[in-house]
């Protein structure tokens, strides 16, 4: 046995025996390579179970196309099988917004594609059920979480039922799974059956009946339960599916939510409420587990791109209260922030500095958002009653404590660790949060200092931010602030750079074809960003993913909160017509853009983009450009 493998959870029977084990309690199957790092779900769940005294093995990226030896090698575990597609939904991982198959996979050694099937949650669960009909199969991870109820699948262009109707897993443990997986293991160890676990929090199960007498065609909401429109009704009526989503999203963002029921034929899908946010002690315990922070030696130094991106980074919190319409973070992690202690973060930073390839630079001190560390409501009673998906839209919640001083203090502590030359912030900065004027002098002064220190000390030449669009109509649908605030932050960024003799760039992200966006909105985006001297490179076409507000609008044509109709570009021609405006400076697009603006009778925009005397030196690569 390679002497290094004893530091990892076993991936083979040989490794298991070398540890002196005679059995395994839990076997985890993952669509990702096994990287023993707190950013990789299988490692987190495996290490959590290990710390509780269970023998855990991992089977990363099992071969589902041969004689299934990967599924057989450990035999039947004492307690259960766990299955996960990996850190991403497999269809997002495999296909582009144009539904073309990707040629690479960032979570596979060598970046090669083909390491997992489409819908691994379904494929792995069904194989295990066939081979081991008596052993419980528990599904988890982002794919299972976001498909826990009826959902639109962009790649098949249809409404699909709960993933539990498509696979043979016994239940889904959705969201962040440390507490759930320990409860499952403990109760099964005590002799309970998987059917006894249906009273747990944060799970999805099948039931034969619903105890609520709710009339078909109407959503029922009681003190502790909500009965949605059935899957069959949603198939017939997209407006009903939109109406469902408002309740699904609100309960996902509640501190103490309700149980959700949805009928699928003769089966009821039951989703129990998300557990309360982890305490600092609980999240510290998870991040302080004995991770090697390295890929398993079985990969023989093959590069795993997703790991390369985060190997020298440190995650400081979970959760996000931004509530962006196209994002699934709060549906998976919750909107309430669970922050690590400064001591736990520093322990991990010291681990990073001890890595043999560390050169002194922490690539990111962040999380789902860069600057929500230790933030939350001042009055927790208000938070307990709140069902709003965003604490920042349409304006910053007056109950939200936006004080950035704990984060500044953390940055200083990280930079003081011996061996750290500089720490960078690679996560997305919410400038609407850091620039928000609270009216509290000490907080406003501290937040201004945060912005200055961020720009001066924590930017690696380029600071990436995500205004996403310039149209107020589109931004409102995205739950993002007005582009006016980007202008304000950009001016601040330039002033700080000038004052400190720096030549750094502000790199904005933009999305085309988002619900509510029309071609003229993209033309105006092009004109406005051109006047800012931006030649855009961080751009993408909107990709519908399960369980986001934007996806529900895209599929149904209705806004779930108002049930008003919303225009969305859904066919390929309309999407390309919008995307081309990102590249107005590329000569190959000029004739098409000119023709379109004339058809829209917008000579004003044509003149702003292509003044008669102007020349455009930027040619060549489609989708590439420069930020000046």
Image: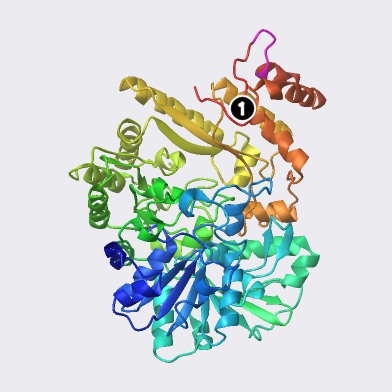
Residue at 67% x, 71% y is 228
Pick the front one: 602 or 18: 18
Looking at the image, residue 547 sits to the left or right of residue 406; the answer is right
Q: Position of residue 155 (x, y in %)?
A: 69, 55
Q: Position of residue 546 (x, y in %)?
A: 62, 59
Q: Position of residue 404 (x, y in %)?
A: 33, 45
Residue at 76% x, 39% y is 574
Q: Main secondary structure of the magenta part?
A: loop
Pick the front one: 195 or 34: 34
Pick the front one: 147 or 103: 103
**Is 471 located above or below residue 54 in the figure?**
above
Quadrant occupied by the N terminus: bottom left
Residue at 39% x, 77% y is 182
Looking at the image, residue 230 sits to the left or right of residue 416; the answer is right
**Is 406 located above or below residue 451 in the figure?**
below
Q: Which residues are magenta?
A: 609-614
Q: Is residue 398 visible?
A: no
Please check the rendered image and state whether residue 344 is part of the magenta-colored stretch, yes or no: no
Label 1 element class = loop
Colour scheme shown: rainbow
The residue under label 1 is 621
Residue 152, located in which quarter of the rendered image? bottom right
Pick the front one: 365 or 418: 418
Looking at the image, residue 520 sits to the left or right of residue 7; the answer is right
């Amino acid at each position: 046995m390679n002497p290094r493998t004893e530091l990892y959870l076993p991936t083979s029977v040989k490794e298991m025996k070398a540890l002196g084990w005679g059995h395994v309690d839990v076997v985890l199957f993952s669509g990702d390579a096994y990287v023993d790092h707190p950013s990789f779900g299988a490692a987190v769940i495996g290490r959590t179970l290990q710390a509780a005294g269970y023998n855990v093995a991992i089977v990363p990226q099992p071969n589902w196309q041969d004689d299934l030896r990967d599924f057989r090698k450990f035999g039947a575990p004492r307690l259960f099988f766990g299955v996960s597609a990996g850190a991403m939904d497999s269809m997002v991982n495999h296909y582009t917004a144009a539904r073309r198959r990707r040629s690479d996979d960032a979570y596979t050694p060598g970046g090669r594609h083909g390491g997992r099937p489409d819908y691994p949650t379904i494929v792995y669960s069904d194989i295990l059920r066939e081979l081991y009909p008596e052993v419980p199969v528990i599904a988890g991870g982002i794919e299972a979480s976001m498909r826990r109820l009826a959902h639109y699948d962009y790649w098949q262009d249809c409404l699909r039922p709960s993933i539990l109707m498509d696979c043979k897993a016994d239940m889904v443990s959705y969201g962040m799974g440390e507490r759930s997986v320990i409860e499952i293991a403990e109760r099964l160890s005590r002799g309970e059956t998987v059917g006894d676990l249906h009273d747990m929090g944060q799970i999805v199960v099948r039931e034969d009946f619903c105890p609520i007498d709710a009339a078909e065609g109407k959503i029922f909401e009681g003190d502790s339960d909500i009965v949605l429109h059935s899957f069959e009704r949603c198939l017939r009526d997209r407006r009903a599916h939109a109406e469902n989503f408002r309740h699904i999203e609100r309960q996902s963002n509640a501190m103490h939510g309700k149980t959700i029921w949805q009928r699928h034929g003769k089966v009821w899908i039951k989703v129990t409420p998300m557990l309360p946010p982890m305490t600092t002690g609980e999240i510290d315990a998870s991040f302080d587990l004995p991770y090697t922070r390295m890929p398993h030696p079985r990969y023989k130094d093959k590069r795993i791109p997703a790991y390369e991106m985060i190997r020298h980074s440190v995650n400081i919190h979970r959760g996000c209260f931004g509530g962006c319409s196209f994002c699934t973070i709060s549906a998976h992690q919750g909107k309430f922030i669970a922050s690590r202690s400064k001591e736990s973060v520093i322990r991990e930073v010291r681990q990073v500095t001890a890595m043999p390839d560390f050169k002194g630079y922490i690539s990111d001190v962040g999380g789902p958002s860069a600057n929500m560390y230790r933030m939350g409501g001042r009055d927790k009673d208000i938070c307990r009653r709140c069902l709003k998906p965003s604490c920042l839209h349409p304006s910053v919640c007056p109950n939200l404590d936006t004080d950035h001083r704990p984060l500044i203090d953390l940055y200083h502590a990280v930079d003081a660790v011996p061996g750290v030359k500089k720490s960078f912030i690679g996560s997305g900065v919410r400038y609407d949060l850091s620039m928000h004027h609270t009216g509290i002098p000490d907080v406003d002064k501290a937040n201004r200092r945060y912005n200055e220190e961020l720009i001066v000390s924590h930017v690696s030449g380029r600071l990436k931010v995500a205004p996403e669009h310039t149209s107020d109509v589109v931004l409102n649908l995205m739950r993002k602030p007005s582009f006016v605030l980007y202008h304000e932050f950009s001016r601040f960024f330039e002033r700080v750079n000038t004052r400190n003799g720096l030549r750094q760039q502000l790199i904005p992200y933009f999305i085309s074809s988002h619900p509510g966006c029309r071609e003229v909105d993209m033309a105006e985006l092009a004109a406005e960003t051109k006047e800012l001297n931006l030649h855009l490179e961080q751009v993408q076409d909107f990709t519908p993913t399960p369980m986001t507000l934007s996806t529900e609008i895209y599929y149904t044509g209705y806004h779930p909160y108002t049930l008003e109709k919303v225009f969305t570009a859904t066919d390929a021609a309309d999407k390309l017509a919008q995307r081309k405006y990102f590249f107005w400076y590329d000569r190959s697009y000029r004739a098409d853009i000119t023709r379109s603006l004339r058809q829209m009778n917008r000579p004003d925009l044509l003149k702003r983009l292509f003044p008669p005397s102007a020349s455009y030196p930027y040619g060549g690569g489609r989708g590439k450009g420069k930020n000046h």
